[in-house]
Structure formats: C-alpha cells, structure tokens
C-alpha cells in the first residue's frame, strides 16, 4: 500500500488540538506512512506501535547505524538486548522502586522550599519556577551533585530536545549533537571518578559500585546512566508536571474531585501521561525489510512509533479524546515509552509529579492558567508540553 504525500492533508503542529483529528485520519487510512519532512516511517496505531517497541530484533534502538553520533559510550536508550538486558539488570540492583520511594520526604521538602520563594507573588511561570526546578534539584540531590550546576544540564537537554525537523535535516546537526553530548559526558565522567576515589552517600557512588553476580557497570555505563537521568528524566518530568496543571485547569470538575480525594492523584497522573505524553515518539531503526500494516519498510530506515497517536487509539482506549481521571490505563499507555526501553526512571517521574501536585493543592486553593499571558508551547516535534506556563495562585 502506498499513498502520495499530496493526498494527505498537512500535519498540524503537535501542540495544535487539530492534530488529534489528523492522527485519527492517519490511523484509519494511513497507519504506517513515510513522513516527507523527516523521512521517518511513522506508525500511528496502538498495536503496530507496540509491535515496533517490543521487537528489538527487527526494530533496533542502536541508532548509530542511522548516522546518529556515538558518544563513545554504550548508551542505554540506544542499546539492544542482550547488552541492554545486562546493564538494566545491574542498574536494577540500585535504582529500584523502593530506593526511589525513599526520596519522598526529600521531594516534598524540595518542593515546599521552592514554593516558599513564591511568597508575595500571585503569578509564576510554572515551568521555569517549579516544573523544571523540582526535577533537576531532585536528580542533583539523588546523585549528590552541586545544586549550582543545574543550569548546565538544563541547557544541554533543551539544546538536544528543542529542535525542529528542519534543523535536524541541516548539515552539521549530528556533529553539533555529538559535541553537546560530549560536554555532559565529560562533566559526569569527572564526577564518577571523584566517587571512585572518595565515595559518598549518594546514588552516583552506588551506581559506580553496582554489582550483580560479580558483574559490575563499567565507568562508561555509569556515566551513561547518569547522563540519561539528566537528559531524558528531568525534561519528561518537567513536561508532565506542567501538562498535569494545565489539563486539570482545563477540566475543573476533575481538579475539584482530585483535590477532595487525593487517592485519585496517582491515576490522574496516568491519564495525563496517556492524554498528553511528554515525548512524542519512540524512534527505532529497521534491521531488515519488513511489512507492517500492509506497508513495506526497507532495511536501515527510521521507524517512529507515535506515542501521541497510539495513546488516542479508539481501538485500545474507549472515548480516547476525553480526559478521564477514572480511566485505568497504567501499563498500557506510552507515556514513558513501552517494552524493552520503558523508561527506567518512570517511578521517579511518577512520584515527583504526584508529590508536586499534592503540595500545590496543599499550598493553594486555586491554581489557574493565565491563557492570555506569556504562554508558550515547547518546540516540537519531540515534546508535547510547555516552555512557559503562566499561572495565577491563590494561597490556601
């Protein structure tokens, strides 16, 4: 099956509500289609996206085969089994749900301290002032790194994530991306070596010494995981926190219900992740010629599972356009990816979002988005969320 690009209406911006009608059209009529801008083969249906994300032998995460720069590290997100399985198992001895849950008091303390600085202000930029600040402060705290270094990782992550398809297609983009990665990696490598010589009571020390059945992480693997925590972890959590505040503002009855019953916060976060996933796609590389949904994809092609479309697939989620905090979609949506590369930091991102919402509800009886203010969406196509989100606050 093939379709001329001229027969398909132009794709709306990922932050334009009209895109969800466009996704529905693509799911129904062109479930696998080669995007004319990026050249990627985009997969729009839930079952097909899940197939791509759970078959690493056919759809590889080793993106260096597609020209992506190699940093000199075995990058966990760009690693296939069995190497990925080995590294993830060792990480699992240290980066566990229970070890993350133990940081709950610290996350609440950090959130309250940041909000204390809002005293006397009735409006803030939720992204810059809170949704970004909390996750990066938490990761620095967990890894035992200086709080004053947070701007470094924020700048690195934004330069990597905030690029347009046109910029990605420009000559020299991949080389520039590699240079950015090296800056972050050099910083983290120095910190890891410091922990080897002078261990501390922090996650970076424990990662540097993680062991399973006599197998330990190499220095490169330790540095890589710390880099993944910063580059991916804090940006996705930032987007999720801001998206949660925005969606609850757009759905005041749901917000009132969650405020009255805090037990609903967890499943509300799941619905936020389904309704507006922070990362738009899961990118893979075809290892051979393959047919999917009647479309032949050649070998060595970018294949992108559309999280935004799959999470709205009516074949999987009844009434998918509705924001329903009683929907049970945990373990099924693509909010933090799926399959082998389901985000290893998902427990931390979920915990931070739940706790930040809880503290906000405790501290403010009203949180409303100023839609006429300086509101700005994050630059597409890789993220769905806000670069600026002005909100008005009324203390409790």
Image (cartoon, rainbow, N blue to C red):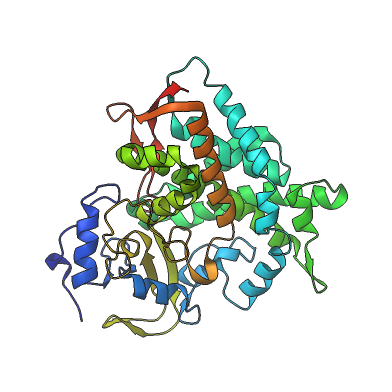
Residue 307 visible in the displayed image: yes
The image quadrant where one finds the N terminus is: bottom left
- From this viewpoint, which residue is outermost toward the top? 120
Q: Nearer the viewer, residue 275 or 62?
A: 275
Image coordinates for residue 152, horizontal then vertical, percent: 59, 39
Q: Residue at x 60, y 60 (%)?
A: 71
Q: Is residue 194 above or below residue 295?
A: above
Q: Residue at x 60, y 65 (%)?
A: 76
User: How many numbered marks, from 0 up?
Assistant: 0
Residue 156 visible in the displayed image: no
Q: Is residue 131 above or below residue 35?
A: above
- Left or right, 125 with respect to 80, comes to left
Q: Is residue 274 above or below residue 187?
A: below
Image coordinates for residue 74, horizontal then vertical, percent: 63, 66
Image coordinates for residue 151, horizontal then vertical, percent: 58, 35
- From this viewpoint, which residue is outermost toward the left? 7
Q: Nearer the viewer, residue 193 or 68?
A: 193
Q: Residue at x 32, y 64 (%)?
A: 317
């Amino acid at each position: 099956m093939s379709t001329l690009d001229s027969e398909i209406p132009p794709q709306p911006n990922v932050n334009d509500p009209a895109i969800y009608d466009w996704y529905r059209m693509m799911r129904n009529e062109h479930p696998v289609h080669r995007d004319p801008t990026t050249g990627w083969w985009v997969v729009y249906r839930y079952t097909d996206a899940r197939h791509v994300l759970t078959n690493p032998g056919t759809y590889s995460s080793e993106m260096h085969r597609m020209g992506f720069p190699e940093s000199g590290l075995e990058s966990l997100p760009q690693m296939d089994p069995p190497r990925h399985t080995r590294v993830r198992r060792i990480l699992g001895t240290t980066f566990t749900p229970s070890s993350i849950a133990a940081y709950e008091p610290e996350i609440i303390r950090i959130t309250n301290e940041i909000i204390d600085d809002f005293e006397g202000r009735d409006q803030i930029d939720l992204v810059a002032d809170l949704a970004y600040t909390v996750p990066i402060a938490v990761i620095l705290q967990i890894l035992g790194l200086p709080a004053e270094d947070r701007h470094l990782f924020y700048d690195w992550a934004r330069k990597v994530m905030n690029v347009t398809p046109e910029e990605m297609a420009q000559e020299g983009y991949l080389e520039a991306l590699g240079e950015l990665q090296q800056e972050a990696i050099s910083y983290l490598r120095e910190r890891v070596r410091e922990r080897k010589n002078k261990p501390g009571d922090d996650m970076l020390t424990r990662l540097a010494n993680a062991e399973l059945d006599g197998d330990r992480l190499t220095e490169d693997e330790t540095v890589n995981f710390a880099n993944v925590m910063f580059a991916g972890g804090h940006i996705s959590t930032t987007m999720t926190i801001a998206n949660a505040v925005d969606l609850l503002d757009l759905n005041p009855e749901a917000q009132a219900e969650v405020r009255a019953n805090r037990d609903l916060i967890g499943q509300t976060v799941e619905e936020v992740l389904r309704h507006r996933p922070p990362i738009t796609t899961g990118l893979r590389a075809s290892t051979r010629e393959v047919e999917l949904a009647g479309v032949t994809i050649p070998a060595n092609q970018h294949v992108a599972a559309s999280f935004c479309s799959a999470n709205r697939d009516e074949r999987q989620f009844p009434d998918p356009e509705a924001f329903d905090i009683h929907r049970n979609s945990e373990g099924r949506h693509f909010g933090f990816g799926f399959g082998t590369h389901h985000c290893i930091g998902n427990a931390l991102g979920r915990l931070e979002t739940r706790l930040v919402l809880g503290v906000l509800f405790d501290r403010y009886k009203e949180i409303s988005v100023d839609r006429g203010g300086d509101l700005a969406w994050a630059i597409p196509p890789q993220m769905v969320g806000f670069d600026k989100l002005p909100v008005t606050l009324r203390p409790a």
